[in-house]
Image (spheres, grey):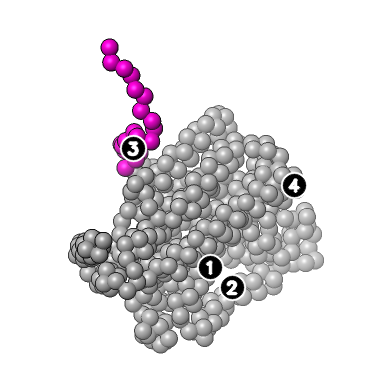
Amino acid sequence: MSTFIDKPFSQMPPVQGIGGGLLRKTKGDKYIWGIVILLAITSLLVVYSATGSLAYRMYKGNTEIYLFKQFAFIVIGIIVIYFAHLINYTLYSRLALYLFLAAIPLMIFTYFFGATINDGSRWIKLPVINMTFQTSDLAKLGLFMYLSRQLSRKQEVIKDLKKGFLPLIVPIAIICLLIAPANLSTALLTGATGLLLMFIGRAKARHIAATIGIALIPVIILVAIAVGTYNHNSEKHTGKNTTVTELRSLGRVGTWINRVQDFIYADATETPYQVQQAKIAIAKGGIIGVGPGNSEAKNFMPHPYSDMIYAVILEEYGLVGGGIIIFIYLVFLLRCIRIFRRCPFAFGAFLALGLSFTLVIQAMANMAVAVNLVPVTGVTLPLVSMGGSSYLFTCASIGIILSVARNVEQIEGKTHPSDNYRDSYEAEASKPVGEAEKTIKKGRAEKEREEEVMG
């Protein structure tokens, strides 16, 4: 009878399989991956809590439906991130122009024939899967990919108005003008993010300041109309002049004026209903909150699972939980800035920074609305609000950022800045993807042979 000898764990071969293979292929900034997981868990908890009243109306109280739906969106979103981060980010440079050009007719089609939800025509209804698709999300992604490409190509003439500035500002203006009729807040945030990226890309501050001045003209006119048409002497709830009603024939202009008037003039009794409920939620939450799932304002607040989800977070988790969410987004921004500083190539650096700016600025805008720092807008909290097309485009943006981070890691791990490998990598933007990858692999092989000889 043979003697049994137990084998130590240290002598056992590593576990192989699908999970191990996925982990080996998962690269990029580990902090960003951690942030995605943290916000995904937060989203599950808060969306499950915030959709109680919606589930009661739509599915006779079956709240698990929205929990499973959100879980499905999170799984699909992580898959999108994973596959997007495996793609060499130089491919996005060649896709940028086509994506940008495709977004323009889609935005025009949405304006005239899109599905109207909450007084705004922002969606196209996909016939097969019966899901709405917000075309402005595609437009923003295409714009910042194209803007990053142009910034990297125009560095030699970036200070010139005709050759450098106008080819960059015109695409921003086109997309913002197409988004504005249905979603002014998103248009303003997109324009501000684009100008910020141009400023970091060394565009002339004088040109940017002039653009801001021109863009402020319609905003000032809108505020002036809101102030001029408000009747201070009328009784409560009748302060808005009939001029506002007439302006509704021009689209959402009347809605914008209403929101500006509410933000400037509304007292405790005239404050918009969702703002009132958000304030109640924040007051009840206090420092540490009322606990997960114990929000009461969610039952009265319009859209607590999307636009006003941060108010639910403040009620259930208090100022501590709300502060942690802000901290997470700031860490995400800092990690993306780190990628920008480490990336040796202009397109990748601008791409990572531009996409991170648009996500973080959108998050800050959503949170500012919840605490009544700015007028009500319709932007969601990235990676936290209930899933939809916006959630998946957010995941695609994060996947692209991680693609840049993955390539930065490969460069730093294989070469020194003085190596020929880096010189060959710099030529990738002007070559087809297949040829670029061959050049990079050839450089790596040469470097490995050099190391073997030196060893």
Q: Amino acid at mark 3?
A: Pro
Does the magenta run of residues contain 78? Answer: no
Q: Is residue 14 magenta?
A: yes
Q: Quadrant of residue 265?
A: bottom right
Q: Amino acid at mark 1?
A: Leu
Q: Amino acid at mark 2?
A: Val
Q: Nearer the N terminus, badge 3 or badge 4? A: 3
Q: Which residue is mark 4?
A: 286
Label located before the other in sequence (3 or 2): 3
The residue that appears at 74% across and 60% down in the rendered structure is 266
- In space, the residues marked 4 and 1 are separated at their CA atoms by 32 Å
Q: Is residue 129 left or right of residue 333?
A: left
Amino acid type assigned to the residue bearing label 4 in the image: Gly
In the image, the segment drawn in magenta is 1-21
Tell whether label 2 touches label 3 (CB within 8 Å): no
CB within 8 Å, label 3 to label 4: no
Callout 1 touching callout 2 (CB < 8 Å): yes
Q: Give the image location of residue 78, x and y in percent.
A: 41, 46
| Quadrant (top left/top right/bottom left/bottom right) for the N terminus | top left
Which mark is on residue 14? 3
